Amino acid sequence: MKQIRIENISKDFMTQEVFSNLSFTVSEKQRIALVGPNGAGKSTLMKCLMGHEDISSGIIGVDDNMRIGYLAQVHPHTGQTIYDLMQASFEEVYQYWKTIKETEDKLDDPEQYDRWEKASSQYENMGGFKNEITIEKVLTQINFPKERWNDLCTNLSGGQRVRLAFGQILCQKPDFLLLDEPTNFLDIESIEWLEDYLINTWKG
């Protein structure tokens, strides 16, 4: 069984103690809520578990080849389309996909055709087309119909950005999810969808 093991961890900001001597284990299939007032260190703890911040002492143990999906409170997006952003979830093949899109209308140029051919071969060999199936499935799950996939992320509401960030995480097929105030900016319908997904669909 995959686990995250926390042993006597502490975190200080200069002279301020955020938390100390925390020990617990998170196992597959568990659903755990971290509750506390603003400023209690909940987000800091999650960042420490992800390795985004260092702990002052203790041990965080994560099984080899285990993937953790982390939904932060802030979801900045560039001027990408919804589909572009989802493709970026697959970092290893994203550059090849970008090259394909940059060159597919310039195939009369021998140099551009060569770039397109090499990128297409790498994209296929690294599972790019399987990724597309995953993207389509996830976008449907998070209620983004196909006619919206070319919408710019900058035009999305706060709740839609949260859903899209969650979709990026699902594309990575994580073993664990760490969700930092995931209902921020969500309307009632989106909150109900998220609750239903975590209870009835999510298997981690």
Image (cartoon, rainbow, N blue to C red):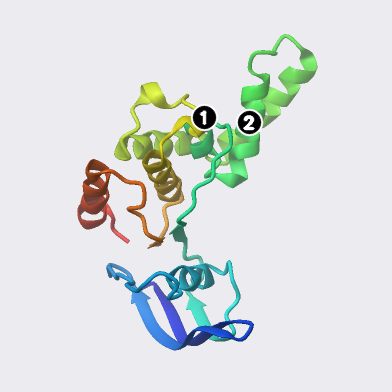
| Horizontal side, residue 156 vs residue 54: left or right | left
The residue where tag 1 is placed is 81
Farthest right residue in view: 111
Placement of the C terminus among the 4 image quadrants: bottom left
State left or right for residue 26 relative to residue 74.
Answer: left
Q: Is residue 11 above or below residue 85?
A: below
Q: Badge 1 local density, few (<14 within 10 Å), some, or many (20+)?
A: some
Residue at image point 46% right, 59% down: 70
Q: Examine the rendered structure and indicate whether residue 79 appears above or below residue 180.
A: above
User: Count the marks: how many?
Assistant: 2
Q: Amino acid at mark 1?
A: Thr
User: Where does the image place residue 24, in percent across and percent down from the top left?
Assistant: 38, 83
The percent position of residue 74, horizontal first and vertical second, equals 49, 52
Q: Is 12 placed above or below 109 here?
A: below
Q: Secondary structure at mark 1?
A: loop
Secondary structure at numbered mark 2: helix
The residue carrying pointer 2 sits among few (fewer than 14), some (14 to 19) or many (20 or more) residues within 10 Å by Cα, namely some
The image's mark for residue 181 is none
